[in-house]
Image (spheres, grey):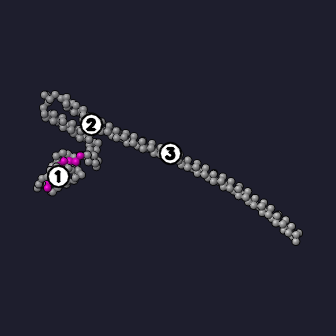
Amino acid sequence: MEKKSKEDLATHTLESEEVNSNLEANVEEMENDKEINVEDVLEKYNSKVAEYEELMNRYVRLQADFNNFKKRTEKEKESSYHFAAQEIIASLLPVMDNFDRALKVDTKETNVENLYKGVEMVYNQLIESLQANGLEEINAVGEKFDPNFHHAVAQEESDEYEENVVTEVFLKGYKVKDKVIRPSMVKVSK
């Protein structure tokens, strides 16, 4: 019985050593896997950090591009405004020149009729210049009253016009394109 026990013990010891050996191999393999997993995780982390930095750089560049775009469009808008103003002013310079000439005329030698004709010519030149830049007179007399284009300052009974029609203009109204610059001051029929 002792012999069997020694054999069992020897077998058990061999099996134990084999299990320990396998266990050590498994532990070693797990430690290697841990190192690989840590390395994988670290590699993925570094990859994500690099991706984040690239996205941040792109974001910063896009933000700078956008700010530059805003500044450029503001400058272009301002430039076009100044250019438009220059064109209008340039078209009014001949009118100013004619007023200068009219003011230099000796009034003792000029009759009223000639002065009137000169002022009328300057007025027509001014109107032409403004119309060339988009100015339009608002039609009023005989038109249905429209508060978008007319400012009623008086009312009158009228047999000639239907109710709520402009009968007289006290001050002309003007618009540029579809924007009213000044409404016409009018009298409206009751």
Q: Nearer the viewer, mark 2 or mark 1?
A: 1
**Depth check, front residue: 50 or 137:** 50
At mark 2, the secondary structure is helix
Apparent side of residue 64 relative to residue 158 in the rendered image (left or right): right
Residue at 39% from the left image edge and 42% from the top image edge: 74
Relative to 124, say whether 2 is above or below.
below
Q: In the rendering, at what x and y percent does residue 49 appear?
A: 58, 49
Give me the disc on residue 166: 1
At mark 3, the secondary structure is helix
Q: Which quadrant of the view contains residue 120?
A: top left
Q: In the rendering, at what x and y percent does residue 89 appear?
A: 29, 37
In which quadrant is the C terminus drawn? bottom left
Disc 2 marks which residue? 92
Residue at 28% from the left image edge and 44% from the top image edge: 134
Overall secondary structure of the magenta stretch? strand
Disc 3 marks which residue? 60
Q: Which of the two discs, 3 and 1, labels the residue nearer the N terminus?
A: 3
Q: Amino acid at mark 2?
A: Leu
Q: Amino acid at mark 3?
A: Val
Q: Which quadrant of the view contains residue 164?
A: bottom left
Q: Which residues are magenta?
A: 182-190
Relative to 165, say whether 102 is above or below.
above
Q: Amino acid at mark 1?
A: Val
Q: Are marks 3 and 1 in contact (CB under 8 Å)?
A: no
Q: In the rendering, at what x and y percent does residue 143 appear?
A: 19, 53
Q: Are marks 2 and 1 in contact (CB under 8 Å)?
A: no
Residue at 82% from the left image edge and 64% from the top image edge: 13
At mark 1, the secondary structure is strand
Characterize the local packing of mark 2: few (<14), some (14-19) or many (20 or more) Cα atoms within 10 angstroms.
Answer: some
Q: Which of the two discs, 2 and 1, labels the residue nearer the N terminus?
A: 2
